[in-house]
Amino acid sequence: MRDLRFLHIDFEEDGYYEDNIVEFDKVSEYLPSSLRFMRWNVFPSSSLPNTFQGKYLVGLEMVNSNIVQLWEDGEEKVLNNLRFLRIVDSKLRTFDLKLAPNLEQLTILFCDDFEELHMPADHHSKLEYLHISFSNLTSLHLGNTPNLKNLTLEDCSNLVELQMPTYSLKLENLNLSDSKLRTLDLGLTPNLKRLNLRNCCDLVEINAPIGCLKNLLFLDLSCCGRFKSFEFDKRYQLAKAGSLSELHLIAEPTDVCPLHSDNDSSKFRFECYYKEDGASSFGNLERLISLGQCACTNLESFSRSICSLEGIKKLTLEGSITEAPLDLDQLECLEELTFSSTEIKYLPDSICRLKHLKSFKIKSCWLLEKLPEDIGRLESLEKLILDDCKLLQDIPNSIWSLTHPRRAIGSSEEHEASSGAEHPQEAMSILREAVCISADLRLPQGP
């Protein structure tokens, strides 16, 4: 076998392996150095034999093996040509990247004892793909990995520290789901397309500078920080340029904040559904991520996070939110605004400066007492819905200044103008009839 280049040994029957383990253990001592690729299922030894030089080896794969370390007795034999290494369901404990300086793909799966991957800081790694799952890894310093495109550390339930490079210009996929990370500094990742932080329940700080997620297509922050769920998937919207960019935020109270256990302020968890125009990049994801890092709600910072969103055309705020964002007029593209089942008592006057608002819905906001006085300044408003607002009694006089109401609803009953209802008097008649359905509402004298 002096010139053997490809070796694939696969034991499917346990009995056959047990009967011949001694013979195959002896064979492994004479692995020819001419090998380019070796895949050995149920490799019997704890390390590669010292007689094997491996100077031509390009690919190595071991599944269900007994291998604990690459070389025995601390030997540091360098495999300069090794490009692909895959260890699955084995007893591997550590691996030093300097033993394979030209490695491009490293996969370590279901190795429960694996606890250390050493990546020398002074080594310019060629690694493009790194996948470790179900390991005992507690920390990882990526060092100098400028070529890394895919980093997956999923179900590493003891992982508490990850040190990313300052620049990860080629990184496209990052999966850290089900880890125990508390902080994550993404650095500069302009080509990141997929970020999965699902079930990172201890994560309380994410440093994502504006613009570092500009090419992101998928984001999952469910059960991360104070996000009960977070859905963003742009992969299926790329062909829909000009589609509606929208945010639906649902708040529910919680008693626990992992950052401030003694803080008496209101605490919330959010369900977040965000959709973005397939052809646009607004930097909104970084702003929304900052919203979910602390359960303690500072209403000023909450308002700032919402009102700084760009390109939003549809906004729905639902649940235990006690105050509406103050500067909603900063959402210059907003066309649809909905408050549903909130605890808001008053709405800010900034709503009246939304020049492109076409639909305004207020549903089951039982504590709402009044509408903004200048609501009539909503020159583009076509639909007004006031449904199940128990404390709302007065309608501002300015409502008669609305010039384009096509539809109005009061107490779950709807009235719609025909497509030919162009005249203000006809529109006002529709509006008067709709709002007066609610016996508790007092409609001002109109024209």
Image: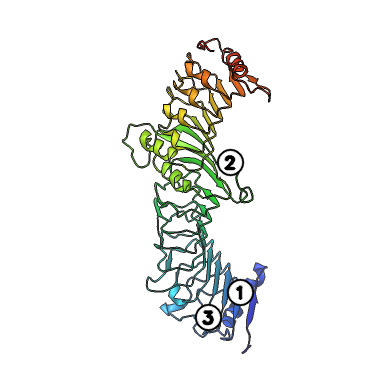
Q: Is residue 320 visible?
A: no
Residue shown at 52% from the left, 80% from the top: 81
Circle 1: residue type: Arg
Residue 372 placed where, x, y %? 44, 22
Q: Which residue is mark 1?
A: 39
Q: Earlier in the sequence, mark 2 or mark 1?
A: 1
Q: Which residue is mark 3?
A: 81
Asked whether the beta carbons under mark 3 and mark 1 sit within 8 Å of each other, the answer is no
Label 3 element class: loop
Residue 145 placed where, x, y %? 44, 68
Q: Nearer the viewer, mark 2 or mark 3?
A: 2
Q: Nearer the viewer, mark 3 or mark 1?
A: 3
As drawn, the residue found furthest toward the front would be: 423
Where 44 sits versus 396, above or below? Answer: below
Q: Is residue 371 visible?
A: yes
Quarter of the view holding residue 359: top right
Label 2 element class: loop
Q: Which residue is mark 2?
A: 244
Classify mark 1: residues with Cα within 10 Å, few (<14), some (14-19) or many (20+). some
Classify mark 3: residues with Cα within 10 Å, few (<14), some (14-19) or many (20+). some
In front here: 337 or 76?
Answer: 337
Circle 2: residue type: Leu
Residue shown at 53% from the left, 56% from the top: 193
